[in-house]
Amino acid sequence: MFSIIRDAGWPIWPLLLCSIAALALIIERLVSLRAVKVAPPNLLEEVISVSRSSLPGADVVNKLAHNSVLGLVLATGLRAVIAEPRITEEALRNAFENAGRVAVHKLERYLNTLGTLASAAPLMGLFGTVIGMIEIFGSPTASGGSNPLMLAHGISVALYNTAFGLIIAIPSLMFYRYFRGLVDAYALELEQSSERMVPHLMRFAVPRGSSH
């Protein structure tokens, strides 16, 4: 492996950095996009159950906000109703929508970078191969002159860069697509949970015309 890296020349070093960055991003997103950290399965039902008869206290809401991404969105709706008892349904929906947008933006963190690495790695590999070809054909004595075996060896070494670029790009693209689908699924779940919470929380809102 080290001999391949040495023979491939300096263009392979940026590819090595890309591979390290892509691996780090994939591991980070695998950890951050787990269901337990984004949308625990029974969280919505638990929140509805706890707030069935009355709104929870500030400590419970704060604990919910730190529970997960979904917990933060639900806590935003609870805080909106607690802070403004006369809140309208439209205002409550806006609070949920704003919290949802922030949550989705958080879930999409680093995905553009991973997608860029997946797109750039093959081009960087091709660039390294072109540089290798230029060096081979620009310096006949370095490749053994008219010796076809030496020339073939030089070309195969130059192609290491393209191969390495593809090795980085293929898994990076696969994980990028996987994470993008996961984020879309979570975004839909956040939206549906918010829709269920709106009528549930509006039961606690004081009508505008009421004096109480």
Image (tube, rainbow, N blue to C red):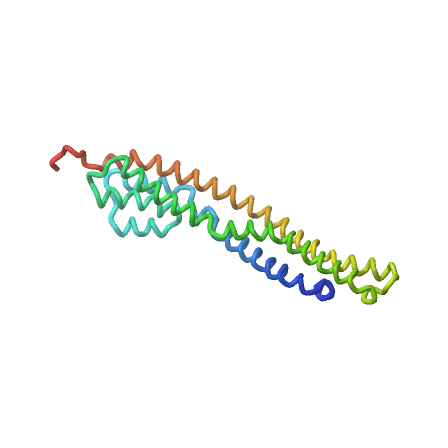
Choose top left, top right, bottom left or bottom right for residue 150: bottom right
Q: Is residue 183 left or right of residue 148?
A: left
Measured as percent of width and height from the top left, residue 143 is found at 82, 64
Residue nearest the observer in this picture, 102 or 75: 102
In the rendered view, would you say 206 is above or below 135?
Answer: above
Q: Position of residue 7 (x, y in %)?
A: 74, 65
Q: Position of residue 51 (x, y in %)?
A: 28, 41
Please tell me how many numbered marks the rendered image carries.
0
Q: Residue at x 14, y 34 (%)?
A: 210
Considering the image in quadrants, where does the C terminus appear?
A: top left
Eyeballing the image, is 169 above or below 87? below
Most foreground residue, 9 or 138: 138
User: Is 148 rendered above or below residue 97?
Assistant: below
| In the image: residue 158, left or right of residue 210 | right
Q: Position of residue 181 (x, y in %)?
A: 52, 41
**Residue 210 as seen in the image, left or right of residue 204:** left
| Residue at x 66% of width, y 54% of height | 165
Front-most of 126 and 104? 126
In terms of image quadrants, where is residue 55?
Answer: top left
Rendering quarter of residue 95: top left
Residue occupying the point 49% across, 52% down? 110
Return the residue nearer the eye: 21 or 73: 21
Give the residue furthest to the left: 211
Q: Residue furthest front?
A: 138
